[in-house]
Image: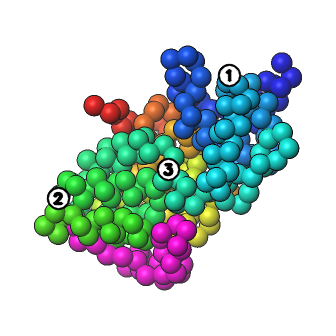
Amino acid sequence: MQARDSARKLWHVPHMPRRTDGAPAKAQRHRSILAALSTDPTVRISALATEFGVSAETVRRDIEELSRQGAVRRTYGGASVVQAALQPELSSRERMAVAERARIGAAAAALVEPGQAVMLDAGSTTTHFARALAARGIAATVLTNNLNAAAELAAAPGGAVRVLLCPGEVSAAERGVYGSETEAFLRRFNADLAVIGASGLTEEGPCEVISRAAWVKRAMLDRAPRRMLLADSGKFGRGLLERVCPLDGLTDLVTEAEPPAGLAAALGRAAVVVSLAGGPT
């Protein structure tokens, strides 16, 4: 009982998807471990096993896999957060919740109308958005600091998408560009829609680990009347270093699962429209 109480003090994961045997799916366990580490520097394997209702050996395998990805460091009896654990490099994030993020990206891309101008943030889910938008083949203009997204969009059939790549300092780890030149460039333009990702989402708003990423997101949100956040349910309740904006700074949230009650109520008060990405067909 004491171990379970201790685990619950570390974090809360709402609506955790579970297999038919009642245990949470591996991808959700990985996101939950990272969420726990973001609020407490160390987590005991025994506490994680108790919370998830799985064996300690299952959690050890989870920790070992996250360690190979560079997201966590093994410690005696558990794991400890490293700087990258709060925001794993893009290459690691791209291997997490792939199906969920692909559905979110496709659902968000379906909301873009022909001829619109879109500002698009750097990140794994926003890259899925770019891939889906390119596949639609509709005419659009996209301003982005996302190197992967720029490549995806430039390959759209018939060159349908005009791509404007932001200037700035290149981050190889994030496959994006950042800095004062990036923000100044964005402020020269008006857009119909800003599409951003985030490291976490709480009742206070979306948040980020990396400040320079938060600054670019704010610049994009300032230039569009429709402001859309793409976030999978693993981000719910994660309050990280820097708040990007209050909830009412958004107009839309696209996700794959219903937000927990407290967050859903806050989104309602802020008049944020929540769109749920459908499952695989």
Per the image, label 1 sits on a secondary structure element best described as loop
| Residue pointed to by mark 2 | 138
Q: Residue 6 occupies which quadrant of the picture?
A: top right
Q: Give the residues drawn in magenta, as a range.
A: 161-189
Three-letter amino acid code at the position of disc 3:
Arg
Q: Which circle marks residue 95 in the picture? A: 3
Number of residues whose C-alpha sits closer than 10 Å to that of mark 3, classed few (under 14), some (14–19) or many (20 or more): few
Q: From mark 1 to mark 2, how far is it between C-alphas?
A: 47 Å
Amino acid bearing label 1: Gly
In whole angstroms, how far apart are the C-alphas of marks 3 and 2? 28 Å
Read off the residue under disc 1. Answer: 53
Please tell me the numbered disc located at residue 117: none
Q: Is residue 262 left or right of residue 230?
A: right
What is the crowding at mark 1: few (fewer than 14 residues within 10 Å), some, or many (at least 20)?
few
Quick check: marks 3 and 2 in contact, CB under 8 Å?
no
Relative to the observer, which residue lies in front, 259 or 250? 259
Q: CA distance from mark 1 to mark 3?
A: 24 Å
